[in-house]
Image (cartoon, coloured by chain):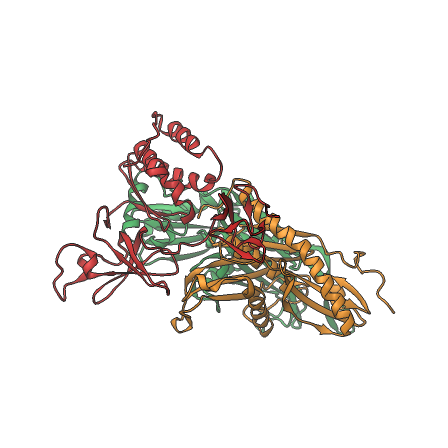
């Protein structure tokens, strides 16, 4: 039984509506908001700054530290208990690995760049929204980066490859594979790949190609948001 | 360490001026309240005072009531000082600053009996509504106390009870469907924090001013001007006369914050 | 076939392709990948002959030898002081470099610079691991007393100072304030009249906001004239 029409009537390669804004948190060195459908992610970057505890300092290169957190009222049903969970710790780590390939750590030895990702509202695709916001925030903070990072969750539902699953699709009764992917737009290389569910090798390849295609569109949105902040003449005074 | 800054601020205050050109009893602009900013929450609000931005969300659940109040719903308020809002906040469990904000806001709402918790009883002794309010600053540029209290009140006002379905003997919340029923409000407490620096009073401090004050008094009042909660902070003591003056300032300033609701 | 893909003063994002072909050279803020030159940070593109470089728009200060900065004393050690430089790296001020006065052994160093004091100093050395040495001996270098401190974006400091100090001189003359601008974005101001001091602060914030819009000097001159009621002359060279 193939998945022929999406629950919210989108096309298979269509994402939910996207909104991106840079510089939303004035106290941070860099910040951004990324909204896709009903998932909203804020990212704030502080750094390079002194790293504590001292024993974690690396004299040869800087450290990138990511902290992903969902606000207690952001869940679909029950309240989410505040504080790190195993899930949020894992997402923090894979987000860090997704961003590392583009950040030039040698520019700030012994120091740390902290990235804080917070979500006030969620509807699937949270780690991907977090990565999109984080990469804009890093650029906004003036961190030396080879490229931005764009991210989307693609999926395979009953053999059909789709982009940007929402909560209902993730929970679909049938054979679903949920595949968050992060792409470095210039090289097309993939810095985040996770999967859970049911999938074939061939379908995975198709899903990855779709992810790359969609990420290029997201990249355009991220670029525009970054340029808009500085072009309007209302740039940050820090 | 901040003595030079304090001296400078005091000099300016003698002329009723502050570091950012404001008068001593002037709130920053804009003061904005936005409702319904988080679709996942049963009620939510975003408050902006100057550049300080705070988001509060309300989540409802049902559970057994506390044994000493078997016919009343329950309310709890927590604040988490998110490290993204201020470079000096560290990730980790709520520190004393966050705990104080949560408890002071809680007191303002609870002690004013602004919500009639008896109306939130579903089945006496067995099931009542639990209201959880979580306050999260997005950008801290000073005066989290007032912004937090205002956001909590606004989020409660925004709250609509979700649909309650009874299946045999158990109650289940259908979070996807919201009813049109709001929370039973009878009063709306608004908080104003007044700071004393030297012999002068100010309201709505920026983060710099928060580093050099001598004492502060947070006062929550209802629309009728009744005091429902107070909290003194800071290292210096206050005279009764000073406390009375600060209460007067607070009661006067609540009007401005109430307008934004 | 070499070609440039951006115009002068275009805002570019990390990874954006600025030029193709081996005729062009990667300047500061860019890197070469194969035949292409790409941006390695968010910035304004500047074409300088055959080199393409970026002016950074944001980012924390990175200590550089020769910079004059305003540091804040944060620790007092056996043989000197440690300063906060408004960057990820602190600076060391040794006893020898603190003052030209002779400091006897075992003396109380807080008599010279105490916790929280702001000091105008010059960076004498930065190692590869970003250990920073500074000196407070030299013309204009000293402990600051009174006044107030504000923080500005380090990348806007050149505009706040102006060519040969012309911009900051204009502010000083218009507001009768003393102003010292550190390369690290820390700025000290002191004025007799609090209102004029506030004006100087707001002028600096205005320069920060509008630094990349052309006609800045004229706009600031007009702003100062309007706020003070005085006629301002733009100095050709600073003090």
Q: Could you say which is closer to the camera, residue C132 or residue B116?
A: C132
- Residue A16 in the figure: left or right of residue B24: right
Colour chain C appears in: red
Q: What percent of the width, then of the height, locates residue A194?
A: 66, 71
Q: What percent of the width, then of the height, locates residue B10?
A: 30, 45
Q: Residue C79 sits in which quadrant?
A: bottom left
Q: Where B108 falls versus C237 (above or below)?
A: below
- Residue C239 in the figure: left or right of residue A168: left
Q: Name the residue at 38% across, 53% down.
A: B210
Question: For the N terminus of chain A, which image quadrant?
Answer: bottom right
- Work out which residue is located at the far right of the displayed protein and give it: A1
Q: Name the residue at 50% across, 44% down.
A: C46
Q: Name the residue at 29% across, 35% down.
A: C193
- Chain in orange? A
On the question of residue B241 being in view, the answer is yes
On the question of residue C195 being in view, the answer is no
Q: Could you say which is closer to the camera, residue B227 or residue B45?
A: B45
Q: What percent of the width, then of the height, locates residue C231?
A: 34, 25
Colour chain B appears in: green
Q: What percent of the width, then of the height, locates residue A195?
A: 69, 72
Q: How many marks?
A: 0
């Amino acid at each position: 039984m193939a998945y022929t029409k999406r629950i919210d009537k989108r096309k298979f390669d269509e994402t939910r509506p996207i909104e991106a804004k840079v510089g939303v948190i004035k106290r941070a060195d860099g910040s951004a908001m990324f909204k896709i459908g009903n998932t909203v992610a804020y990212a704030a970057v502080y750094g390079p700054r002194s790293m504590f505890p001292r024993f974690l300092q690396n004299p040869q290169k800087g450290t990138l530290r990511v902290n992903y957190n969902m606000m207690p009222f952001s869940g679909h049903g029950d309240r989410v208990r505040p504080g790190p969970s195993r899930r949020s710790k894992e997402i923090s780590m894979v987000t860090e690995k997704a961003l590392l390939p583009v950040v030039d750590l040698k520019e700030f030895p012994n120091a740390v760049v902290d990235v804080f990702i917070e979500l006030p509202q969620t509807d699937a695709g949270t780690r991907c929204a977090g990565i999109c916001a984080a990469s804009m925030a890093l650029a906004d903070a003036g961190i030396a980066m080879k490229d931005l990072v764009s991210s989307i969750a693609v999926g395979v539902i009953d053999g059909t490859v789709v982009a940007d699953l929402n909560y209902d699709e993730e929970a679909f009764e049938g054979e679903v594979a949920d595949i968050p992917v992060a792409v470095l737009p210039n090289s097309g290389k993939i810095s985040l790949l996770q999967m859970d569910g049911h999938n074939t090798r061939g379908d995975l390849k198709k899903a990855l190609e779709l992810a790359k295609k969609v990420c290029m569109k997201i990249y355009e949105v991220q670029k525009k948001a970054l340029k808009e902040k500085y072009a309007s003449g209302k740039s940050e005074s820090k | 360490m901040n003595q030079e800054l304090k001296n400078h601020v005091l000099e300016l205050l003698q002329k009723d001026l502050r570091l950012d050109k404001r008068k001593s009893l002037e709130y920053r602009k804009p003061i904005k309240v936005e409702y319904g900013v988080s679709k996942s929450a049963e009620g939510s609000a975003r408050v902006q005072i100057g550049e300080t931005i705070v988001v509060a969300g309300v989540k409802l659940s049902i559970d057994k009531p506390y044994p000493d109040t078997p016919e009343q719903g329950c309310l709890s308020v927590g604040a988490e000082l998110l490290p993204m809002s201020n470079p000096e906040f560290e990730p980790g469990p709520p520190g004393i600053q966050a705990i104080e904000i949560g408890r002071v806001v809680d007191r303002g709402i609870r002690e004013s009996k602004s919500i009639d918790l008896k109306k939130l009883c579903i089945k006496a002794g067995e099931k009542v509504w639990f209201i959880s309010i979580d306050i999260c600053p997005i950008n801290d540029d000073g005066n989290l106390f007032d912004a937090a209290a205002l956001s909590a009140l606004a989020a409660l006002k925004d709250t609509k009870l979700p649909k309650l379905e009874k299946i045999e003997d158990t109650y289940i919340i259908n979070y996807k469907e919201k009813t049109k029923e709001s929370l039973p409000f009878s009063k709306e407490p608004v908080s104003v924090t007044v700071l004393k620096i030297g012999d002068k009073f100010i309201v709505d401090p920026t983060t710099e001013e928060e580093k050099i004050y001598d004492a502060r008094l947070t006062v929550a009042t209802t629309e009728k001007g009744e005091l429902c909660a107070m909290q003194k902070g800071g290292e210096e003591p206050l005279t009764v006369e000073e406390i009375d003056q600060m209460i007067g300032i607070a009661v006067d300033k609540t009007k401005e914050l109430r307008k934004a609701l | 076939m070499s070609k440039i893909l951006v115009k002068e003063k275009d805002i570019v994002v990390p990874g954006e392709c600025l030029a193709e072909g081996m005729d062009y050279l990667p300047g500061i803020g860019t890197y070469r990948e194969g035949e292409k030159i790409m941006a390695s940070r968010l910035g304004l593109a500047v074409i300088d002959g055959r080199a393409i470089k970026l002016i950074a728009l944001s980012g924390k200060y990175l200590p550089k030898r020769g910079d004059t900065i305003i540091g804040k004393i944060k620790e007092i050690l056996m043989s000197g002081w440690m300063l906060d430089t408004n960057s990820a790296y602190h600076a060391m001020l040794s006893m020898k470099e603190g003052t030209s006065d002779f400091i006897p052994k075992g003396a109380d160093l807080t008599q010279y610079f105490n916790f929280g004091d702001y000091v105008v100093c010059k960076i004498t050395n930065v190692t590869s691991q970003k250990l920073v040495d500074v000196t407070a001996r030299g013309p204009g270098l000293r402990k600051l007393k009174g006044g107030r401190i504000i923080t500005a974006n380090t990348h806007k400091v050149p505009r706040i100072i102006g060519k040969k100090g012309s911009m900051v001189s204009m502010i000083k003359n218009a507001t009768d304030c003393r102003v010292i601008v550190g390369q690290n974005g820390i700025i000290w101001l002191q004025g007799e009249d609090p209102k004029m001091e506030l004006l100087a602060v707001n002028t600096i914030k205005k320069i920060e906001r509008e630094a990349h819009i052309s006609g800045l000097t004229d706009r600031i001159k007009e702003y100062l004239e309007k706020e003070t009621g005085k006629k301002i002359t733009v100095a050709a060279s600073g003090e």
